[in-house]
Image (spheres, rainbow, N blue to C red):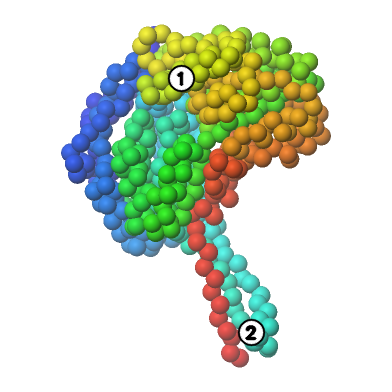
Amino acid sequence: MTVTLEKSVEDFIATPRQLFIGGRWVHAASGKTFATPNPATGETLAHIAEADAEDVDRAVRAARAAFDGPWSRLTASDRGRIIWRIGDLIEEHADELAQLESLDNGKPLAVARAADIPLAAELFRYMAGWATKIEGNTIALSVPYLPGAEFHAYTLREPIGVVAQIIPWNFPLLMAAWKLGPALATGNTVILKPAEQTPLSALRLAELMAEAGLPDGVVNVLPGYGETAGAALAAHDGVDKVAFTGSTEVGKLIVQAAAGNLKKVSLELGGKSPNVVFDDVDPELAIPGAANAIFFNHGQCCVAGSRLFVQESRFDEVVEGVATIARGIKLGSGLDPDTQMGPLVSDEQLRRVTGFLESGRADGARTVAGGNRHGEHGYFVQPTVITGTNPDMAVVREEIFGPVVVASPFSTLDEIADQANATDYGLGAGIWTRDVSKAHALAKRIRAGTVWINCYNVFDAALPFGGYKQSGWGREMGHEVLEAYTEVKAICTQLHI
């Protein structure tokens, strides 16, 4: 039995959705629309206006006018109050937003309601507090070639300007919050491009931001395809910065496109995260922890613990434990209260993940649990545990972005440190052990932006998140993210006394 949709949700998806530019809902200049599917059925969920280069031009002009005009004239305190109000409105509309997220992305409604929506609200509130705390420094100068001269020198942190933000489909509302919160707190204006697979919650968020009092043009929302709207944003000379979350492959294209006017770039990209279980671990903690690390959000997490390493003496026990959990996970529509794992987001993603499963079998890997598509309708894949791999296999090297974990044994700390780092990525890692010294020794050696010890998938607005190596540039969240959205200006005045 599925959840009954709120009338506001039914009305929202029944109405063709437009672009949000300059505080107004407008048709795409081309008149084109695209369909966003329900991943649980494959059927069309809603029709969305398709932004293209001309729409990007309109949005950039609107964002620039807002940056030079009303947004820059607000005090930091007023800006913070608006951002806080956005968080309040997300919370007030939590059930509605969770239903939209579950419909469009496929994730279980209970997960969206418990994690995605509250985390998004808290992100805006956390960043609202930073609006009044963007500070510079005074600097004591000692200029050797001007003996005796006195100076008053200080720095300012100023907004970069017009920011293009391109977000993925795995956590649509939460990724919008991660991007918008710090950009607004630091005084920038934004053109947000949600993923074409999941535009609905970003479009509803645009309505809530207007209700919160955000001036026209401060945030513009352009659904569309990466090859058109996304590429036009990344290359646009009127954009001062582009922030992207998505695959490493596309991130490299963003960097190339941004070179035209040398706009600032921050990137949160892919991962192939190691999850390390030592033999002294409590299996009642580590086994469900390892399963959660890979199967949460259907494995559609850039930080998913997709490479499971278990010390030799506990390998069979832990792998079978994770496999048992995998076999027992109930797949179904996100709106079914009994569902523990929903579908993948799209037919394209279904084909990608099942292609990796076929590749693993062809390479001689052993499937312990799952390994196939689930059902004939929708984009479902069985939670899968694979062993018998080697480092050259695609299932070990490449980001699958689905509920698929490869498990390998190890013997010593030195060995696992090398194996954990044997990847082009460096986004996250997990360590499970009772030995705190061992945990911190390994955490120091792993080249990744986040290392969880005896836990996994713990996120907080105050905790910085980002990657080493090909997992990206810069950090999301925490005070570190403010550097990604500000310029530092040095001002020096000679004092003539």
Q: In the displayed structure, does residue 118 sit left or right of residue 165?
A: right
Q: Position of residue 3 (x, y in %)?
A: 38, 15
Kind of residue sitting beneath label 2: Glu
Q: Position of residue 58 (x, y in %)?
A: 25, 51
Q: Is residue 111 visible?
A: yes
Image vertical order of residue 179 relative to residue 402, above or below: below
Mark 1 = which residue?
A: 355
Dot 1: within a 10 Å radius of its alpha carbon, few (fewer than 14), some, or many (20 or more) residues?
some
Q: Nearer the viewer, residue 11 or 416?
A: 416
Q: Residue at x 64, y 22 (%)?
A: 390
Q: Quadrant of residue 453?
A: top right
Q: Residue 282, position in %: x, y?
A: 75, 19
Q: Amino acid at mark 1?
A: Gly
Q: Residue at x 75, y 15 (%)?
A: 314
Most foreground residue, 122 or 92: 122
Q: Earlier in the sequence, mark 2 or mark 1?
A: 2
Q: CA distance from mark 2 to mark 1?
A: 68 Å
Outermost residue on the left side: it is 31
Between label 2 and label 1, give the one nearer the viewer.
Answer: 1
Which numbered marker is on residue 150? 2
Q: Secondary structure at mark 1?
A: helix
